[in-house]
Image: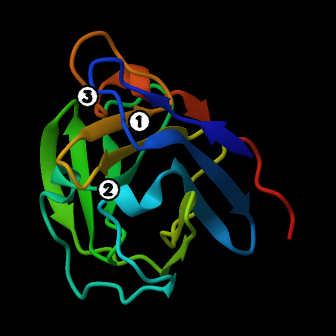
């Protein structure tokens, strides 16, 4: 399934036309995300190369301060959630929250695979976090895109009123269905 992300109205992009996420979930392969960015890619803070990335050995805090692709995962009606952050250079982070912005702990859950595809007008980052979310899990998908001139745009399935806040319950706008049989 493919979902288009919405740019936060208070932080418009200059070089990015669109951001979308392709989500796959299967019994055999688990959960995978492919973030697709369309626009003037040479004006974005993303690495020049493509292919499989070297995954950092340990988690890195603060990835959201530059280009970062994020997924938040929770169960319907539950206050706790997990946040995964992925930088296009192979750095990552994973956090467990017991309630809205109430950090319980950082986790050392390294992703299975991260790969990138870069073109003049598109950039894709494929992430396989190595998790198997349950049917009915709620997702918040988001991205921070930094441009070379320092402009930052904030993209999500849905935005709550006010400043960008990917942790807000309104952002958990996608419910996972049954996985495809592989």
- Label 2 neighbour load within 10 Å: few <14, some 14-19, many 20+: many
**Which residue carries the number 2 mark?**
68
How far across and how far down the image is residue 117, in percent?
Answer: 57, 73
**Which residue carries the number 1 mark?**
155
Q: Which numbered circle lies on residue 165?
A: 3
State the separation of the CA atoms marked 1 and 3.
10 Å
How far across and how far down the image is residue 69, in percent?
Answer: 38, 54
Q: At numbered mark 1, what does the secondary structure look like: helix, strand or loop? A: strand
Name the residue at 34% across, 50% down.
82
The first of marks 3 and 2 along the sequence is: 2
Q: Quadrant of residue 106?
A: bottom left
- Label 1 neighbour load within 10 Å: few <14, some 14-19, many 20+: many
- Tell me if 152 is positioned left or right of 139 in this view: left
- Tell me if 68 is positioned left or right of 16 in this view: left
Q: Which residue is more in the foreground, 44 or 53? A: 44
Q: At numbered mark 3, what does the secondary structure look like: helix, strand or loop? A: loop
How far across and how far down the image is residue 10, in percent?
Answer: 27, 18
Q: Quadrant of residue 148?
A: bottom left
Name the residue at 58% across, 44% down.
20
State the separation of the CA atoms marked 3 and 2.
14 Å
Q: Which residue is more in the foreground, 38 or 166? A: 38
């Amino acid at each position: 399934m493919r979902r288009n992300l919405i740019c936060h109205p208070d932080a418009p992009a200059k070089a990015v036309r669109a951001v979308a996420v392709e989500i796959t979930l299967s019994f055999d392969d688990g959960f995978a995300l492919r973030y697709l960015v369309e626009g003037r890619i040479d004006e974005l803070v993303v690495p020049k190369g493509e292919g499989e990335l070297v995954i950092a050995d340990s988690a890195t805090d603060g990835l959201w301060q530059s280009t970062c692709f994020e997924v938040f995962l929770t169960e319907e009606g539950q206050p706790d959630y997990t946040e995964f952050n992925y930088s296009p250079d192979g750095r990552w982070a994973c956090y467990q929250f017991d309630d809205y912005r109430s950090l319980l702990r950082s986790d050392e859950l390294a992703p299975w695979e991260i790969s990138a595809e870069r073109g003049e007008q598109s950039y894709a980052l494929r992430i396989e976090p190595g998790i198997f979310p349950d049917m009915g899990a709620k997702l918040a998908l988001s991205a921070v895109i930094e441009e070379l001139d320092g402009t930052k745009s904030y993209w999500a399935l849905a935005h709550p009123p006010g400043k960008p806040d990917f942790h807000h319950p309104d952002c958990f706008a996608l419910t996972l269905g049954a996985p495809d049989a592989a």
